[in-house]
Image (tube, helix red, strand yellow):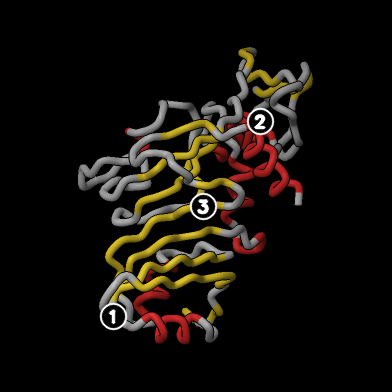
Amino acid sequence: MRLQRMLARAGVASRRRAEDLIRAGRVRVNGRVATVGISVDPESDVITVRGRRVQPVRTVWIALHKPVGHVVTRRDPQGRPTIFELVPPIRALTYVGRLDVTTSGLLLLTTDGETAHRMTHPRYAVERSYRLRVHGRSVDNIRRALGRPIVIDRQPVRLLHYRVRPIGGASADLTLVLAEGRYRIVRRVCRQLGLKVERLTRLSYGPVQLGRLPCGKWRYLSKRELEAVRALRAA
């Protein structure tokens, strides 16, 4: 990890301000004056700023069942409840991808910014699955539409798998598995297909499943899930 990024993550200063501190000679790594851009291991290197040791941020992974109505941000100017009101006040905790205010389901939070970046970057095509209740077209029409390429903003949607189940009338239970996370992509797909979304829930993100986690509750990732997440980073 780059030194300035480690300092920012530890809450010492912004990344730009951390670079200024390094250039001013106020940061040492294992007793030596540091330079901008060097790599450090927060777990094994002794890093000091103005003579005081910087404590590394411990790596934490949390799965939250986000309720409808909560905003994925730290502070909302409209005064709506945020997801950070539902999880422990852990330093440097950030979310992995977003869910809009009307969407519920699995939201991952972590202090591991590098892996979070990898899991959200389009290049790595990490899978996400969603369950929806939709209206507006027959099940057969929905299947035919999903069986054809879907293009949004001149880019094909990375739809890996889908399942459609009738629930009566012009309503259907729909499961979509995507290998991308463009802004509101599931709702945009439905809008393009002429479907009205009544309910939308994210069921999984990468190797982590929502499972039976109650709405509004959180849990730490299991050892097996952590190993699978680390494997994504190494891939």
Q: CA distance from mark 1 to mark 3?
A: 26 Å
Instruction: Name the foreground residue: 196 vs 77.
Output: 196
Q: Amino acid at mark 1?
A: Gly
Q: Amino acid at mark 3?
A: Ser
- Residue drawn 58% across the image and 65% down it: 179
Q: Residues within 10 Å of mark 2 (few under 14, many from 20)?
A: many
Q: Secondary structure at mark 1?
A: loop
Marks 1 and 3 in Cβ contact (< 8 Å): no
Q: CA distance from mark 3 to mark 2?
A: 41 Å
Give the label on residue 136, or none: 1
- Residue drawn 42% across the image and 75% down it: 189
- Residue drawn 66% across the image and 60% down it: 124
Which quadrant would the N terminus be assigned to in this image? top right
- Residue 41 location, quadrant: top right
Q: Secondary structure at mark 2?
A: helix
Q: Residues within 10 Å of mark 1 (few under 14, many from 20)?
A: some
Q: Secondary structure at mark 3?
A: strand
Give the label on residue 22, or none: 2
Tell me: 61 left or right of 70. Answer: right
Estimate the x, y position of residue 118 in percent, counting from the top left.
Answer: 63, 51
